[in-house]
Image (cartoon, helix red, strand yellow):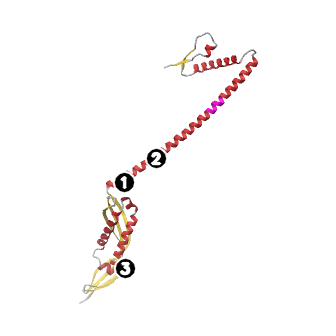
Amino acid sequence: MCIPCFFTISTSEVGVIERFGKYARLVQPGLGFTICPAEQLVGRMSFRVQQIDVRVETKTLDNVFITTVVSVQYQVLREKVFEAFYSLANPAQQITAHIYDVMRAELPTLELDAVFETKEELALAVKNCLSETMSTYGYQILQVLITDLDPDQRVKNAMNEINSSKRLKYAVAERAEGDKILKVKSAEAEAEAKYLSGVGVAKQRKAIVDGLRTSIVDFSDGVKGTTSKDIMDLLLLTQYFDCIRDVGTAPHCRTTFVPSSRSAGDDVRNALLQVEASK
């Protein structure tokens, strides 16, 4: 005696019905039924996007072991539900095997730095391989992502030290360039200051010479019988006493020694001024 058995199929799913152990038909979402005991709902296939994460450990061309995490997003093709249900007992295991095969074939041909640079190319290679194989079994590979590249901790520490050394070297070079610019600008400023100081001294001396010349001419015209030597001696004596006055009034000066000779001419002009600073 055959009786109807009712069931429901959720949205984004399809039911697989067998009659006496042989595939009979697919049941779409909603209310469905089977003629028991001749027919039986043997399974459901979901059209939702599924994801599998696979960790692969292998070594690179420069003999560095690295662990990669490959995420594969896939779903069942609506037109190949029969193949998807009956071809593979464990599609995730099949996908994992292909990921291992591709990654362990590609990574040993690349150095560690190149692995990080060609991550997109590696993901594309895995996707192409899986798409070609899994489409036969009724599965569509939507996306393949390499979500993590994790070398050995000691390798990561070494890479960080190398990067730190490069940045330190760059900083030292920049600091040296800055010091060089400061020294060059300082030398240029010093040279300019010395040049301006020399110009000032030259103008000062010229003014002194012009003043002396004017004084000699005026004195000669005002005092009859005087010679140029007499006038120069008087000027030198005046400057000598100005010097004594300046030394004596200096803050650090305590004692001034003057020769005691009575000849006020050449002895005063050639006197040696000695100053002893107090302790």
Residue 122, horizontal then vertical, whole percent: 37, 66
Query: Which label belongs to residue 78?
Result: 3
Residue range of the region highlighted in magenta in the rendering: 198-204
Location of residue 41 (image quadrant): bottom left
Secondary structure under tag 1 reads helix
Mark 1: few/some/many CA within 10 Å (<14, 14-19, 20+): few
Residue labelled with disc 2: 173
Three-letter residue code for mark 1 = Met
**Quadrant assignment, res 12:** bottom left
Given contact means CB atoms under 8 Å apart, are the residues at marks 3 and 1 in contact?
no
Label 2 secondary element:
helix
Q: Alpha carbon of mark 3 to alpha carbon of mark 2: how far?
A: 63 Å
Which residue is most to the bottom? 1
Residue type highlighted by circle 3:
Arg
Q: CA distance from mark 3 to mark 1?
A: 48 Å
Q: Percent from the top left, x then y, of residue 109?
A: 35, 63
Query: Are the residues at dot 1 and dot 2 in contact (C-beta closer than 8 Å)?
Result: no
Residue 6 at least partly seen: no
Viewer-proximal residue among 147 and 110:
110
| Quarter occupied by residue 100 | bottom left
- Most extreme residue toward the top is 262
Left or right, 37 with respect to 235, comes to left
Determine which residue is flagged by label 1: 159
Of mark 1 and mark 2, the one earlier in the sequence is: 1
Q: Position of residue 39 (x, y in %)?
A: 27, 85
